[in-house]
Amino acid sequence: MKLAAEGLAKRFAGGVEALADVSIELAAGEFVSIVGPSGCGKSTLLAMLAGLLEPSAGRILLDGVAARDGVAARDGLLGRIGYMPQRDLLMEWRTTLQNATLGLELAGVARAAARERALAEVGRFGLAGFEDRRPSALSGGMRQRAALLRTFLAGRDMMVLDEPFGALDALTREAMREWLLGVWESDRKTILLVTHDVEEAVFLSDRVYVMSGRPGRIRTAVEVSLPRPRTLELTATPAFAELKARLLAPLREEARSALGSA
Ligand SMILES: Nc1ncnc2c1ncn2[C@@H]1O[C@H](COP(=O)(O)OP(=O)(O)OP(=O)(O)O)[C@@H](O)[C@H]1O
Ligand SMILES: [Mg+2]
């Protein structure tokens, strides 16, 4: 599935202008990231793409077909794109496995069948042996993988992931990146990832969009044509460092001007 956002804007009731004139594109099977300062509207953008929030202006096209105007746009998008929100939203009264199957159950898949599909994936998601634990008995990395498993199991061709590794320590993040890349390389879903982490964005992506401070706009898009499959060793190469620097320069400018205008 191909996704295009054209001129998306969002002004919330109460007047906060979160996003202004954002256009992005994802081709089928691409891994694309968005980086930008805190509060620039990244989560707002993903919620609009997932059909949970109505844009104030602009349009979203799936395979060239625009989600219709007004409330109907939500009907057109909702459920077509897998969505992992910024907080993992695991439910404490459900076990790891029951959390993973939630999306399937909501989609009408019988409980036993949903359980079977989740069980087939727990090994690959590093959750074997923890199927029947409650979320509070999982580590931070496991919680993230359980939430990712729920998103993956929902079976959409395209997924938007909002800072899936946000709350993890540096080494766990690094290991999770390599792991996510392995999953993506075998499944070839289309992924749009939001992250604060420039290194993460370069390592994972085919293209990285850099957003400005609020109201968020696309400042620049950087193509990452590093070879695949990628391993963590790539992060020590000059080509990698050069791409990182190209992303950091506009982000630093944004951070400085945010302080200057405060
Ligand atoms: N439901 C809402 N009602 C009003 N304002 C909102 C709402 N959701 C977000 N905002 C505002 O919109 C702006 C963008 O928020 P958003 O969460 O999209 O930023 P973000 O880029 O994801 O930030 P972070 O990197 O900290 O997660 C913020 O100023 C926020 O306060
Ligand atoms: Mg956010």
Image (cartoon, grey):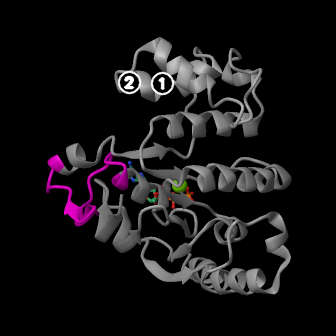
How far across and how far down the image is residue 256, in percent?
A: 63, 82
Q: Secondary structure at mark 1?
A: helix
Rendering coords of residue 58 (x, y %):
24, 68
Tell me the residue at 72%/29% (across/down).
127
Occupied quadrant, residue 105: top left
Q: Which residue is mark 2?
A: 106
Question: Closer to the camera, 43 or 200?
Answer: 200
| Residue 163 seen from this side | no
Classify mark 2: residues with Cα within 10 Å, few (<14), some (14-19) or many (20+): few
Distance from the alpha carbon under mark 1 to that under mark 2? 6 Å
Q: Is residue 42 visible?
A: yes
- The answer to whether residue 67 is magenta is yes
Q: Amino acid at mark 2?
A: Leu
Residue for point 78% across, 64% down: 231
Asked if residue 260 is positioned above or below residue 94 in the image, the reply reads below
Left or right: 47, with 89 as reference point: left
Residue type at numbered disc 1: Leu
Contact between labelled residues 2 and 1, with CB atoms less than 8 Å apart: yes
Residue 13: assigned label: none
Residue plotted at (57% across, 72% down)? 206
The count of marks equals 2
Magenta residues, start to end: 48-72
Which picture quadrant has residue 241?
A: bottom right
The one nearer the camera, 206 or 78, is 206
User: Element type at marker 2?
Assistant: helix
* Quarter of the image where the C terminus is located: bottom right
Residue 131 falls inside the magenta stretch: no
